[in-house]
Image: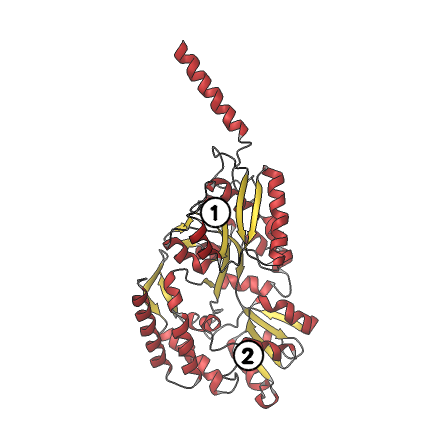
Amino acid sequence: MKKFLAMLMVAVLTLGVLAACGPQRETGNNGGSAEGEGTTTEGADKPEKLTVWVNDDEKQRAALDEIFAAYTEETGIEVEATGISMLDQVEALALDGPAGNGPDVFFGPHDRLGDIVLRGLADPIDLGEDASLYSETAINAVTVDGETYGVPQVIETYGMFYNKDLVSAEEIETMEGLMTVAKEQTDAGQDKYGFLMEATNFYFIYPFFAGNGGYVFNNDGSGFDAKDIGLANEGAVEGGELVQSWFENGYIPKEINGDIMSGLFTEGKVATVLTGPWNIATYRDALGDKLGTATLPKLENGDVPKSFVGVKAWMLSSYSENPEWAIDLMKFITNYDNAMKYYQAAGEMPALQEALDSEEIANDEIIGAFAEQTQYGEPMPNIPQMQQVWDPMGSALQFIANGDDVGEVLEEAVKTIEDNIAASGAE
């Protein structure tokens, strides 16, 4: 009898502890009413506080403060937010995490993930069926070795801006049409151009390699293979020759950069430019209703070129003592209502597919084209070896602009990338 009473007392105390922890929620994208399977807060002690590192952008911070307040009201958990540049958070976490001063949740670009995982700074996140709520491209971007390491907040890529007084969307729908516009409207002596882009910047040039069969690192679905580089294959050479023709024909000046390009476009001297949505505010202020956007022009093979897609995501610190509730918060931040609230305040496209498909975004005359382009794009490789690609390819594009043999230049660039990877020890 005494043994039975003792067991009964333990059961009562256990129920009391769980009740004291507050309601246990199935985490999900509706702020606690998700139907998908994945990490839940059931059985996890509710913390008094969660700490979050946010990017130190005023508009982003204002939106997040409002979202955090709503989370506190719903759960009773205080959210302590600290603004740190997302580009500095990894190094800060490496120092503060082991000392017990790091956050539960931090924020950053997906292309740093390989390094973050290698250094043991983030733990994988089980999104379960909720993974399907986000753009497939975004989920692929935050996946390393088959495991998800982030809850996507923002997805971005580049596309075409055009001046409606100078060109129509139909005229730049294909590469052939774009080249016609470039030929007819370029008068370098008058600083007038049909088409401009940063054509020696590999980030922007990549679609013309990838659209023809080039690739940075081969990915068969199981992850990137840094030993299989496709930047000098037949498709990459074809893309390089296309880029070289722009310089040879005088369509794009060799000294072009982003500032010069944007300056000429806002002055009404350029029909169309290839760049990203971060220029929307500047271009809209200058051109008003004359501003239009479009996806990248289709190549001769009929495909829309594969642009690099970047994703900004919330990540779970490996030092967090509240992983279940930290994941719950990340899902809350990125649910539909909050994703749209963040988009409206910060102007960054949400990675939640329902939000991307919403009338407000998909039918928006300016942002809609960029949302559509993300469906054609591919995530920038998120492995550490990617850092060894930028400089050699930037130099290669300079040589291509100067008329050097494209095949030889790209083969030399790939050899340099391979040597740099070997020297870095990141094979």
Looking at the image, residue 114 sits to the left or right of residue 176; the answer is left
Provide the secondary structure element on which disc 1 rests. loop
Residue 210 lies in what quarter of the image?
Answer: bottom left
The label nearer to you, 1 versus 2, is: 1
State the residue at coordinates (50%, 72%). 298
Q: Residues within 10 Å of mark 1 (few under 14, many from 20)?
A: few
Among all residues in the image, which is located at the extreme right?
289
Q: Which residue is mark 1?
A: 101
Hey, what amino acid is under mark 1?
Asn
Q: Which residue is mark 2?
A: 196
State the residue at coordinates (41%, 82%). 399
Residue 422 lies in what quarter of the image?
Answer: bottom left
Residue 153: numbered disc: none
Looking at the image, residue 423 sits to the left or right of residue 236; the answer is left
Q: Nearer the viewer, residue 319 or 363?
A: 319
Image quarter in which the N terminus is found: top left
Residue 140 seen by the camera: yes
Q: Position of residue 338 (x, y in %)?
A: 60, 49
Of labels 1 and 2, earlier in sequence is 1
State the residue at coordinates (61%, 89%). 190
State the residue at coordinates (42%, 54%). 143
Q: Position of residue 347 (x, y in %)?
A: 61, 60
Residue 217 lies in what quarter of the image?
Answer: bottom left
Hey, what amino acid is under mark 2?
Leu
Question: In this picture, is 84 found above or below 408?
Answer: above
**Disc 1 and disc 2 in contact, CB within 8 angstroms:** no
- What is the C-alpha distance between the residues marked 1 and 2? 47 Å
